[in-house]
Amino acid sequence: MEANTPATASPADGVKAMAGYKASSQLGNIVRQVGEVTAERERRAKTHEDAMQVLFKAQQKLDEKEKQVEACKKKYEKVMKDLKEKQNRRDELREQTEEANRQMKSFLASVKETCRKTTFLAEDVKAKHHAAERAAERGWSCRQTGTSIMTPRGSQSREGREEPVDSALV
């Protein structure tokens, strides 16, 4: 067989050679594109994996934050409940204190009035007692028991009977 040399080469051989070169070139392009697609797919898979890890970590952080928020809400609700109870207790104690103050003022007014009356009556009783003692020492009373202003003790009245001196009234 003869070797294809440029002098013996036919035009069909040139077309075949050109077709082989184009096929080889296209095959090289296809292999290169497959390599690029594979590399891009691997790069995107890596990016996707990294994004999934970031998402997973973010989801874990979100879950932790939600737990913290829930704990804060529970604590807030407990604090608000305690605050409401304390406010109610404060209001109740304020009402009791106001009622006790009103009762104390009333009691003090009553005691003051009683003290004044007692002081007046004690002075009155003391004065009457001293007047009765002085009348007993003198033997006669300054009380009017008839027409005479100065009636001696144990004296006779107009009707003829003896009138005793009432020391409680004097």
Image (cartoon, rainbow, N blue to C red):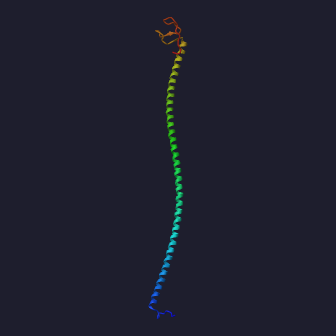
| Residue 92 visible in the snapshot | yes
In the foreground, 87 or 138: 87
Numbered label tally: 0
Q: Position of residue 77 (x, y in %)?
A: 51, 49
Image quadrant assignment for residue 138:
top right
Q: Position of residue 15 (x, y in %)?
A: 45, 88
In the foreground, 16 or 113: 16
Q: In the displayed structure, would residue 34 be above or below residue 17? A: above
Residue depicted at 52% across the width and 61% down the height: 59
Q: Residue furthest front?
A: 1
Residue depicted at 52% across the width and 46% down the height: 81
Q: In the displayed structure, would residue 135 be above or below residue 90? A: above
Q: In the displayed structure, would residue 43 be above or below residue 149? A: below
Q: In the displayed structure, would residue 123 be above or below residue 12? A: above
Residue depicted at 52% across the width and 17% down the height: 128
Q: Position of residue 56 (x, y in %)?
A: 53, 63
Q: Position of residue 112 (x, y in %)?
A: 50, 28
